[in-house]
Image (cartoon, grey):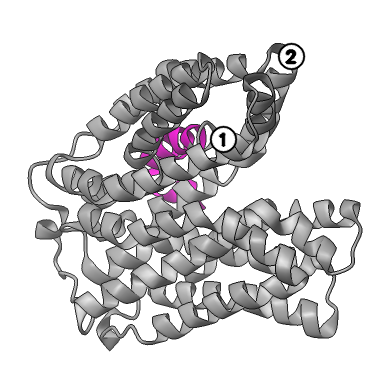
Amino acid sequence: MIRSSPNFGLTLTLGSTQTLAWASSYYLPAILAVPMTRELGMPPSWVFAAFSAALLLTAILGPSVGRWIDMHGGRGVLMASNGVIALGLAIMALSQGVSTLMLAWLITGIGMAMGLYDAAFATLGRLLGRSARSSITGVTLLAGFASTIGWPLTALIENEWGWRAACAAWAMLHIFIGLPLNALLPKAESSHAEDKEEHPVQPPERPRVAMVLLAFVFAAGWFVSTAMAAHLPRLLQETGVSLSVAVAAAALVGPAQVAARLGEFALLRHLHPLVAARVATTLHPLGAALLAIFGMPAAGFALLHGAGNGMMTIASGTLPLALFGPTGFGRRQGIIIAPARAMQALAPLLFGLLIEQRGAGALWLTTGLMLLATLALLCVRVSKGHQKVAA
């Protein structure tokens, strides 16, 4: 399906570099936090605190990175991200205590601001304009395997040679694979993509209000996504299932994300992304209701949550693009996603404390947030002529 796109090479290149970027940053603490802190003589919470600080820095820098991509294109920013993340990982590999570990994660956070989805989506918007939707979907589809590839590879290297070797290996992959691949990206032309469009985007009613609503929607979505990523097996155990069942069910989230992204590409790409986003925000509450009220198996909840999360990732790039157009897309994307990054940093701690207090009742918080996100999306209005958006 994606191969039929004329931008298949661009999608494949960015999908590959995004897989590398996510696997070597966002998904690193889950495997390396314990061996890191065991050797350095500190509690694992220090690693996650440093990681949270990196995510907050990413949120702060996002609008500036997006503005730069709007002005100059994303090729140079993405290439630089490989060098910055590699530097952070190299310092991480040499860390001897809290100060150097924190420095390493802060540098990595700068690289994450320059090299994760937000920068990739802004680059696609700058290059392709409104037609970037298919490529954004393709990139998220490929990068959906970041944890599937990253966790086993990190664990393998750590088990054979230690966590320092794992950090160094990821740093070298950025230099010898990520950097050359990003160098293949086309340079952005001097004119804005929207200037070439026959039918410029008509902004939604009250565009500033729409931006605030989208910022809330994605903040809620990323809080729920990160909370589930950190605590889903534990949460499912609180519903009464065994550890083995909880882990097996949680493992279905990844495949569900990929399947939902394929479904979005095949079935919903001719509709406005607002439709897909509204559907996505209802799936987690639906799963929680079926789990709590009707005793649906844990695997069913994991599948519905994963499908909604997969579609929300696409919507974070395609919906702002469809509503506001490619002009200024990078800066606007950075502003909209900044609260989501902050909530992402706080989610593991806050939701973990809530599980300790309420057990499976913690699902009421995530369910409420996603229902409020659905309501917010229902308040975003677009003209009838823009209800359908070609892929």
- Residue closest to the eye, 144 or 345: 345
Residue 314 place in picture, x, y as percent: 45, 59
Q: Is residue 85 left or right of residue 260?
A: left
Residue 92 located left or right of residue 356: left
Q: Where residue 185 appears, x then y in whole percent?
A: 29, 32
Identify which amino acid the numbered label 1 is placed on.
Val
Which residue position is annotated with label 1?
Answer: 47
Which residue is pictured at 49% across the width and 50% down the height? 140
Residue 204 point in image, percent of width and height:
23, 80
Which mark lies nearer to you, 2 or 1? 1
Please state which amino acid type lies under the numbered disc 2.
Answer: Glu
In the rendered image, the quadrant that contains the C terminus is: bottom left
Task: Find residue 210 and name its label.
Answer: none
Q: Secondary structure at mark 2?
A: helix
* Residue at image coords 52%, 42%: 49
Position of residue 86 relative to residue 27, above or below, is: above
For residue 160, which numbered disc appears in the image?
2
- Is any part of residue 61 visible from this angle? yes
**For the magenta stretch, what is the residue range?**
1-21
Return the disc, 2 or 1, that comes first in the chain's sequence. 1
Residue 4 forms part of the magenta stretch? yes
- SS class, disc 1: helix
Mark 1, Cα crowd under 10 Å, few <14 / some 14-19 / many 20+, is many
Q: Does the magenta portion include 174? A: no
Left or right, 377 with respect to 301, comes to: left
